[in-house]
Amino acid sequence: MEFIKTTIQDHVAIVSLDRGKSNAINETMLDELQKMVKSVEQDANIFGLILTGKHGFFTAGLDLIELYNYNEEQMLSFWTKFLKLINTLVEFKKPFITAISGHSPAGGCVLAICADYRVMAEGEYIIGLNEVPVGIIVPDSIFELYAFWIGEAKAYRNLLEGKLMNPAEAKQIGLVDATSSIDSLMTVALKQMKVYLQLEQNTWQQSKQNLRKKLIAKVNENQQETVEKVLQQWWSASTRAILKTIIGNLKG
């Protein structure tokens, strides 16, 4: 794997995103994550999954610099794979925790909230869905995922404002379940994993699937029309102008 690293500790897979400083998501990372998550789910010797990043960044979200230069075929492939990965993570039966090791806006937040439990590093970090200010239409399946944790009204307002929160604010509304120092982040994640794994696992997993039934149905809906709208806006002059400015700032 080029952009993710995996270790096994006490039958738990710890998958770390490892792509540049900010762990920005490109198509290769999506492919690797999809393959690894499926492998973990099918391995009877692995009982749970922890997804984390590197100190300072869980993931900054989509790699806008790389994606800006994708052609139409590449962008269609990317969004199809991104939504497929969200589907896979939402449906993942085993205990799944995200140890959010720093900034986690946009696509980073989406990956984080697929988990059963989220612990975020304390500090000057941000998390949230800020796609609208960037000029990216949010698929309704992602809205449903966001609302699953914080409620529809708050998710609606936050999405339309592109609201980003610090760890304490995110914990207050239920977007994350706990915060800790960066040094204790994995300790907290592993402790919560033990809470889940001490329970009878067939009962736990079936209960998880039942509780997520509506959410799973939503992410399994045909996303073709939504992707078409996302891509139509992506290629619009207004969004391209916003992206060009953001990319200039990132490179600067």
Image (tube, helix red, strand yellow):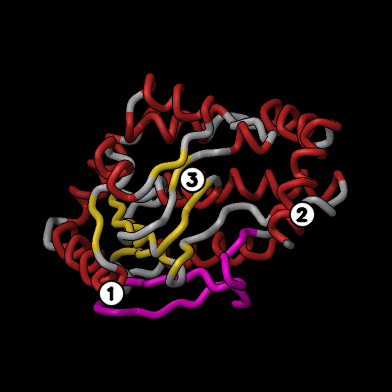
Give percent across and percent down for residue 13. Answer: 36, 72
Q: Which sits earlier in the primary sequence, circle 2 or circle 3?
A: 3
45 sits to left or right of 82: left
Give the residue type that dot 3 points to.
Val
In screen coordinates, is 32 left or right of 116? right
Crowd class of label 3 (few under 14; some 14 to 19; many from 20; radius 10 Å): many
Q: Compared to 75, does 36 lie above or below?
A: below
Q: Quadrant of the C terminus?
A: bottom right
Q: Which residue is mark 1?
A: 183
Residue depicted at 39% across the width and 69% down the height: 43
Residue corresponding to mark 2: 248
Q: Which residues are magenta?
A: 1-25
Q: Amino acid at mark 2?
A: Gly
In the rendering, which numbered label is found on residue 110?
Answer: 3
**Dot in front, 1 or 3:** 1
Q: Is residue 167 left or right of residue 67?
A: left
The quarter of the picture where the N terminus appears is bottom right
